[in-house]
Amino acid sequence: MAIFTVLSLSLTWDVASELIFFVRVTRFPNIGSLYTWIQIASLTAIGIASFAAFALVTTTAIRIDRLQIFSITLAFGLLAEGILIGLHRGHSFDLPFASQIYYWLNMTLGFCVGFGSSYREKDIEALERLVARFCVLLVIATWAGIVALEVVRITTGAAFYIGYPSEQLLLPLAHYGQRRRWLVVLLILITFALTGKRGPLVASAFMLIYFIAMGHLRRSLIPAAVIALSLSMLPSVVSTMENHGWVSEDSLAGRAVHKWKITFEYATTDATIASSGRNLEIQYAMPQLDRPLDWFLGLGYGWSFHYPDDESPYHFVHLSYLNYVMTYGVAGAGLLFSAIAAALLAIWRNALVAGSRPLLQMIPPFLGGCLLTAFTDHLLGIYLVFWIFLGLGLQLAIRRNITTE
């Protein structure tokens, strides 16, 4: 099945990215031709994924129903809108244009792979084993990368900035949370805290509430209140730890504590420092939507913004949702967000039913964690695994309804 190949390759890339990140930071901190290579890779991926997406849609093993027709129509409608609006505005086919089509291909290809397959019982069991094995590898690879970088930093005295990636741990967190492996869940939560990644840490709080409440809203009230109280005490705890020197400023924990401290200290006085420059992205990008029609239809493929003192001519906002609004407008992005919400609701409702597969039960918290992280990172554009599991979860939910009726 196509999903085994695509999902295996995607998760293998997540594991290998730890090694790539280590090599890039330690050996090639400044890559002058980085954008050129990204453009070449994007164009290559566009060609390969285009044929693959069409093949998956036309040779799917299951009957094409109204939901699939709507999904395909929406996806290719967004593609047509993005290209036509971009060409109308005079955008050239350079890196931003290619990158935004690549984001569209990630979405369409991932969803088609997940949703356009016919799942027998043995296929689902094989997928569960595949996810379980890669979750182990992702946890090990992430910690191996962190330890290796810390060893290099300590032994060489390197002053490079280390921002450890951790978004790939959302899948293991969903997997082990669903199986109630609380020690591994705790290890992943500690990893999120040490990396200083605020988006995944907030997402992990939501996922933890979900696991404790078993997905039920009423049961989530008490754990949500406890976690909210704990988070409200975090600023004073962080300030106390740094002021009393309980952690070394140069240590892994010390850097994370310092990052959280400046986030809280400057939250109301300097949004640029508190948000790591996210507010500047919005400040420079939003003025391009200067007409009501721009808000409605977007800027199309090829838009970007430029920092005045930055050598790079192309930048995008980290906020995934604003990227979609800027590209497709309120009309296209609104349809896309509504479709995601409807799919997530269907998956969640079927995952709560007694006797549902563990694979289906872990998908709602994983998708929810990704959607929360997308507020601080362009995760939806680049993370193929999210779209695969969105399509997979929706297909499993539909399949379950069919088998129980």
Image (cartoon, rainbow, N blue to C red):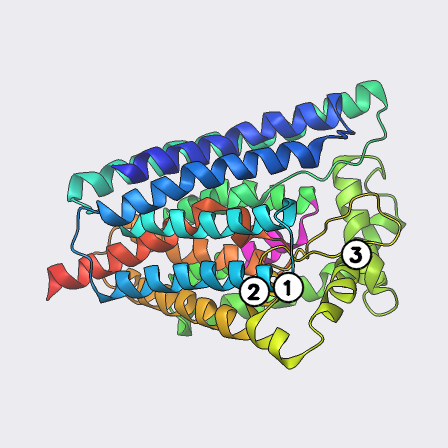
Q: Which residues are magenta?
A: 196-205
Secondary structure under the numbered disc 1 in the rendered image: loop
- Decide which of tag 3 and tag 2 comes sooner along the chain: 2
In-image side of 281 versus 244 (left or right): left
Secondary structure under the numbered disc 2 in the rendered image: helix
Measured as percent of width and height from the top left, residue 144 is found at 60, 26
Can I make out residue 220 in this image?
Answer: yes
Tell me if label 2 and label 1 are in contact, CB under 8 Å. yes
Residue position marked by numbered label 1 in the rendering: 89
User: Where, by quadrant of the figure, is residue 228 drawn?
Assistant: bottom right
Q: Residue at x 78, y 66 (%)?
A: 283
Q: Is residue 202 magenta?
A: yes
Q: Residue at x 84, y 57 (%)?
A: 273
Considering only vertical position in the picture, is 346 above or below 366?
below
Residue 277 disc label: 3
Secondary structure under the numbered disc 3 in the rendered image: loop
Residue 55 disc label: none
Measured as percent of width and height from the top left, residue 191 is found at 61, 41
Residue position marked by numbered label 2 in the rendering: 85
**Marks 2 and 1, Cα distance to the nearest angstrom?**
6 Å
* Residue type for callout 3: Gly
Which of the two residues, 403 or 233, is positioned nearer the viewer here? 403
Which of the two residues, 169 or 395, is positioned nearer the viewer here? 395
Measured as percent of width and height from the top left, residue 367 is found at 44, 56
* Residue type for callout 2: Ile
Can I make out residue 180 in this image?
Answer: no
Measured as percent of width and height from the top left, residue 48 is found at 42, 36
**Marks 1 and 3, Cα distance to the nearest angstrom?**
28 Å
User: Where, by quadrant of the figure, is residue 270 drawn?
Assistant: bottom right
In-image side of 267 versus 340 (left or right): right
Tell me the quadrant of the picture where the C terminus can be found. bottom left
In-image side of 304 versus 40 (left or right): right
